[in-house]
Every structure is written in C-alpha cells, then in structure tokens.
Image (spheres, rainbow, N blue to C red):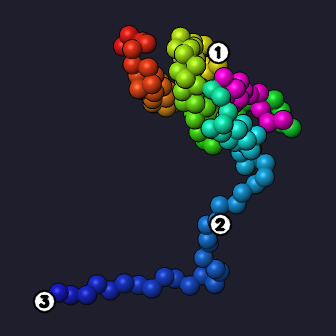
Amino acid sequence: MSEAMDVDPPAETGKAPETVPAAAEDDEDEEQITDLLDLLSQSEDDALPPTAKIPLLTSILTESGPPDGDGEARYGPKASSVKERAVYGLARSYCATGRYDEVVALLTGDVCRGFFDNATKAKCAKVVRAVLDVVCGLAPEQLDM
C-alpha cells in the first residue's frame, strides 16, 4: 500500500509570477566583429595566394578595435573564435609558402601575443597544439619535433 502525499497548492499573492526576461541584446553590449569576419572570409578565398592571405590574417590578430570604436582590441568569445581561426590560417599560409620558421615566430612573437594574453591557458594550449599538428601534417620533414 502506498500513501499519497498531501501537497499544498501555491499561495495566491495576487501578483503575476516573476518571469525571467528573454536574453535582451543591447546594441552596446553586442560584440561587433563584422570587420574581422570580412577579413577572415577574404582570407579563405581559394583564389587568393597564400602570400596575400598572410597580411589579412595578421591584421585580424593585431587589430586595435572596431573602426568606429575606442581603439581597444576585441577579445570577446566571438572575436576570440575569429582570431583562433586566423592563427590556424596563418600557420597554413606560412607552410604553403615554405616559411616554416615564421610559424615559431607566430606563436612566440608579437602577432599572437595579445590573443594569448587574453585567452585561457587551456585555449592557448589547444591553439599551440593545433598549429603544431598543422605544421606536422603539411611539412613533417621541416621541423624537429
């Protein structure tokens, strides 16, 4: 035999229950990265030679903020994702042009410094590992690992 539990109904307070508002997007808080996305899409054009992709991708990583903004570089989730893709694209472009030493400079130099300084350690480790995998896949005989 099982007995049913008595449950008291919710007390009527006369006011509507509080609802959590849907995610309201403020234009001020919205991450503006359309210029970074434009540069990334230009760099992903297969007709563009790797030597022409390098300046586009480098400009994504060394940007100093939106054209109409306050001059601060962007490192929000969306911008970080675009910058991560730019690092991978730069590594592939350097390998395609035979500039393997530039990959090391990419990871240790000023180009990625801002990105790495604002990313978590786990994200940095993931990016470095992925770049090393790209280099090992495209030019396994070039670097001693």
SS at circle 2: loop
Mark pair 1, 3: CA separation: 74 Å
Label located before the other in sequence (1 or 3): 3
Residue 20 picture location, percent across and down: 61, 66
For the residues bearing labels 2 and 3, Cβ distance under 8 angstroms: no
Q: Is residue 109 above or below residue 56?
A: above
Label located before the other in sequence (1 or 2): 2
Residue 129 picture location, percent across and down: 43, 26
Residue 99 picture location, percent across and down: 56, 14
Instruction: Provide the residue designation for mark 3.
Output: 1
Image quadrant in which you'd find residue 126: top left
Residue 111: tell me if it is visible: yes
Q: Residues within 10 Å of mark 1 (few under 14, many from 20)?
A: few
Q: Does 59 appear in magenta? A: yes
Please tell me which residue is depicted at 65% across the width and 61% down the height of the picture: 23
Instruction: Provide the residue designation for mark 2.
Output: 21
Characterize the magenta stretch by its predominant secondary structure.
helix
Q: Is residue 109 above or below residue 35?
A: above
